[in-house]
Image (spheres, rainbow, N blue to C red):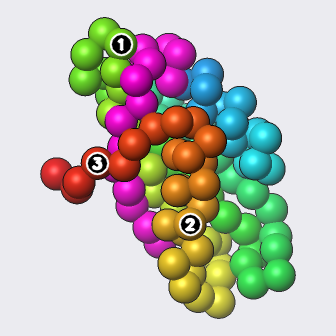
Amino acid sequence: MAKVQATLERSVDEAREAVLVTAADQGWRFAPAESLVDVLVLTRGMGGSSWGSRMTVQLQASTPSSTDLTLITGEALGVADWWRGRRIIRRLLEQLGARETPAR
């Protein structure tokens, strides 16, 4: 499990759409039944060392044109995370153009 906070210089609506498009490009599926307007739940199927991955992305406006993100990953029945969650989050943030911020 990993938890990372970041800032994306886009409005909440733009950030939400950017997260959904970028996550889909990286193989994540949006789980609308488990999501809220400001909390996106993303899932990914089985892999070599995992029985499935899950990422939640919380979006909160910090200004009209900037959004704070809190990203949390987890494995359904993973053998071990070995920093995998943090790498997954950083890959998403890098593609989004978001910057990681210190935990609050």
What residue did someone put label 3 on? 101
* Residues at marks 1 and 2, CA–CA distance in whole angstroms: 27 Å
Mark 3 is surrounded, within 10 Å at the Cα level, by few (under 14), some (14 to 19) or many (20 or more) other residues, namely few
Circle 2 residue: 87
Q: Position of residue 101 (x, y in %)?
A: 28, 48
- Where does residue 10 sit, x and y in percent of width and height? 44, 19
Quadrant of the rendered structure where residue 7 is? Answer: top left
Lower sequence index among marks 1 and 2: 1
The answer to whether any part of residue 59 appears in the image is no
Label 3 SS: strand
Q: Nearer the viewer, residue 29 or 36?
A: 29
* Mark 2, other Cα within 10 Å: few <14 / some 14–19 / many ≥20: few
Q: Report the residue that reaches farthest toward the left.
A: 104
Tell whether 58 sits left or right of 92.
Answer: left
> What separation in Å lies between label 2 and label 3 (alpha carbons)?
15 Å
Report the span colored magenta.
1-15
Residue 92 lies in the magenta-colored region: no
Q: Residue at x 60, y 61 (%)?
A: 88
Residue 32 place in picture, x, y as percent: 66, 32
Q: Amino acid at mark 1?
A: Ser
Q: Is residue 46 visible?
A: yes
Compared with 98, 79 (above or below) is below
Residue type indicated by callout 3: Thr
Residue 68: quarter of image: top left
Q: Residue, x 51% and y 78% (percent of image)?
A: 83
Secondary structure of the residue carrying tag 1 is loop
Q: Are marks 2 and 3 in contact (CB under 8 Å)?
A: no
Q: Inspect the image, locate mark 2, and give the three-letter code of the amino acid beneath it.
A: Arg
First reached walking from the N terminus: tag 3 or tag 1: 1
Q: Residue at x 16, y 51 (%)?
A: 104
